Amino acid sequence: MLDSLKSPMILNLVLVILLMLVNWGIEAFKWKLSIQNVQRINFFKAFKAVLSGISFSVTTPNRMGEYFGRVLYMEEGNRLRTISLTIVGSISQLMITLLMGAVGIIFLMPKIQSAEIISVLWVKVLLYGVIAVLIGLTVFYFRLTWLIKWIDRFPQSSRYIYLVNTLEDLNSGLLFKLLFLSLLRFIVFSIQYYLLFRLYGTGINWWPGFWAVSVSFLIMAIIPTFAIAELGLRGKVSLKLLGLLSANDLGITITTGTIWLINLVVPAIIGSLLILGIKKIVTNKDEEL
């Protein structure tokens, strides 16, 4: 393992760090696109908002808190209106995760069956359940106006309908763009794993590794967990699935830990510093008043 870190393969680690910036940069561009009809912001501001959202998300189940970090960068009257748009971006990412995870289950089914790590019956239940949810999400995603009509039926809904009215501005072209950007993020994630697989000498090849990682993403999306405490669960899931492809448990474990550190902990620290900067600006303005 130490030999890997001293070899030219250490460049893989540098690439993984750079891809972390690419990953969150794509997410920033995706968010910038989704909120453009409410408030236009530049890419740099969107990137800072995404990093700030990560710092909020680490202490909330399945990173739900990221919305609160992002809205700090919106103007006062637009903050609540952008939450529904941010959720749509998350749905697009979830749809890609479900789709790739379902294909990954199909690809890995023979290996899962031969290794007997879980009953094939339960694997099929999971697969059919994921497909059903994916179909439902897809219909909902491309028919967001249904949600507005449904909310409009409730008494006194006029007080809150403005929170979702912005969804009417999301045309099919924009929704497809969000899906495409979500797919790009998914591919970036997978490349990061592959680079670290090679760095830590796991011997896992790209194609089977890609699908095993896809299933692990799916499982992590399904199970409610706190991002700051998910390393242990992520490690167990990775060992079960990637263990079908490699006996190098140490390499798999370190890969998982490195991904968690680079993709989540480092951005969360940067986001926390950005939030402190916002608070300092607000405090100075209050003192001037």
Image (cartoon, helix red, strand yellow):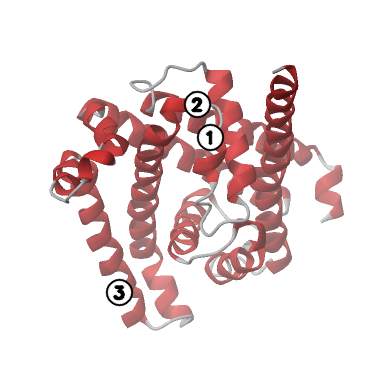
Tell me the element at label 3: helix
Where residue 199 appears, as percent x and y from the top left, is 72, 48
Q: Residue at x 27, y 55 (%)?
A: 134
Q: Nearer the viewer, residue 207 or 44?
A: 44
- Quadrant in which residue 248 is drawn: bottom right
| C-alpha separation, residue under disc 3 versus residue under disc 2 | 44 Å
Mark 1 and mark 2 residues within 8 Å of each other at the beta carbon: yes
Which residue is disc 1 drawn over? 70
Sequence-wise first label, 1 or 3 = 1
Q: Nearer the viewer, mark 1 or mark 3?
A: 1
Please tell me how crowded label 1 is: few (under 14), some (14-19), or many (20+) other residues with Cα within 10 Å: many
Tell me the element at label 1: helix
Give the numbered dot on residue 74: 2
Where residue 273 appears, as percent x and y from the top left, is 74, 34
Q: Residue at x 55, y 28 (%)?
A: 25
Q: Residue at x 33, y 59 (%)?
A: 102
Tell me the element at label 2: loop
Which residue is disc 3 drawn over? 124
* Residue furthest front as drawn: 289
Q: Nearer the viewer, residue 275 or 27?
A: 275
Q: Amino acid at mark 2?
A: Met
Q: Amino acid at mark 3?
A: Lys
